[in-house]
Amino acid sequence: MPDLHQRSIEIIHAGQFDGAYAACLSFSQYGYCWLRDGMWIAHGMDVVGQSTSARAFHQWAARTLLRYRDKAEGLLAKLTKGEGLTEADYLPTRFELDGRIGQEDWPDFQLDGYGAWLWGLVQFIQAHGDDDLWQEARPAVALLVRYLEALWRSPNYDCWEEHRHHIHPATLAALYGGLCAVQSLSPELVPGGLPETIRDFVLTNAVASDGHFMKYLGNDEVDASLLWLALPYKLVDIHDHRFLKTLAKIEQDIYRPGEGVYRYRADTYYGGGQWLLLTLWLAWAYLELDQPTKAQNLISWVEAQASVTGEMPEQVAGHLLAPAYYDQWVERWGTSASPLLWSHGMYLLLKSLLKDSLT
């Protein structure tokens, strides 16, 4: 087995083009760059010293967003006039590697990636004192803040590109975290009280009767993306009683002890397998809760899922939630994505965090 740390860096470099990270070039639907996935890949690269790669991604994202300034301004003008919006009015959730908008039919109105990029951009700038990057990206950031201010209450696709007509706490957490991050650098860019309003909305509307956060408003199930509310976006503290109840329900409902984490209990995508990056997110929660042995066990399980050439998949099919659906997805799109750059980026991040926790 190759050194998975070094192999992850090599795989990510091989999937980067002019700054953009291709989610998975070997998978028929993932030859694009998502802002959310890309940010986490960049963040993982940055924490292991690959800052040139990470910076190139943030530059790509900023210039790509500015390329569609007129599209965003057109949407905002429609809203000002009280005109209805169509799906074509929204900025997309993914881009071609050269920054163009893909022509395929895809669930595009999805906001969490935009909040995620704001958060990640600010983390990079603060870590490196990179004012030049901030000045370069600031016009795109200002545009994006206005876009998110106008749309944050709107039902939109969740991070899995499902449930278009619902409001998702994980999405709102990403917006809260991103806007707070921008506010920490340039308070004048963020309307006063906007992050707090988003947070209050979640705490008022997205908590189930037994005290855990909901998958989406009106659905009391949990989704592994609810871990984002504390990590990294800090909409609530990791010790918040609502988050701890959510964590306990995730452990009970969508975590297979000794193995990995599922997205949510009703998942049928590729039969509903265990996702490596979500398993790493649970490991992160354990690290923050001072449970390093639990975290190490999850990281070791993730490492064991890598191929003999060190490639990490999106999910594994050992214990599917809905096995009857697996062959349907393979027939439609081919075998599940591998190597998934987001899995590798999260692996780099968690190995670094684990090392820090033990020193």
Image (cartoon, grey):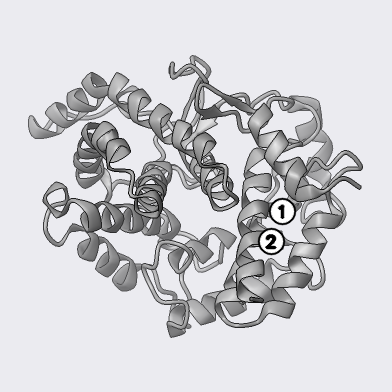
Residue 78, horizontal then vertical, whole percent: 15, 27
Residue 238, horizontal then vertical, whole percent: 47, 77
Q: Are marks 2 and 1 in contact (CB under 8 Å)?
A: yes
Tell me: 196 left or right of 346.
left
- Spatial CA span between label 2 and label 1: 5 Å
Secondary structure category for the residue under label 2: helix
Secondary structure category for the residue under label 1: helix
Residue 332, horizontal then vertical, whole percent: 75, 26
User: Which residue is identified by label 1?
Assistant: 276
> Observer-nearest residue: 273 or 167?
273
The answer to which image quadrant residue 28 occupies is top right
Tell me: 258 left or right of 238.
right
Is residue 283 visible in the rendered structure shown here?
A: no
Query: Residue at image x 33%, y 66%?
Result: 202
Which kind of residue does numbered mark 1 sit on? Leu
Query: Residue at image x 57%, y 42%?
Result: 50
Name the mark on residue 279: 2
**How packed is label 1: few (under 14 Cα within 10 Å), some, or many (20 or more)?**
many
> Observer-nearest residue: 71 or 6?
6
> Observer-nearest residue: 261 or 43?
43
Q: Is residue 161 above or below residue 102?
A: below
Residue 9, horizontal then vertical, whole percent: 68, 40
Name the mark on residue 26: none
Tell me: 16 left or right of 113.
right
Is residue 52 visible in the rendered structure shown here?
A: yes
Q: Is residue 285 above or below residue 96?
A: below
Query: Residue at image x 35%, y 47%?
Result: 125
Which kind of residue does numbered mark 2 sit on? Thr
Query: Residue at image x 53%, y 65%?
Result: 227
Q: Is residue 17 above or below residue 258?
A: above
Q: Is residue 88 above or below residue 147?
A: above
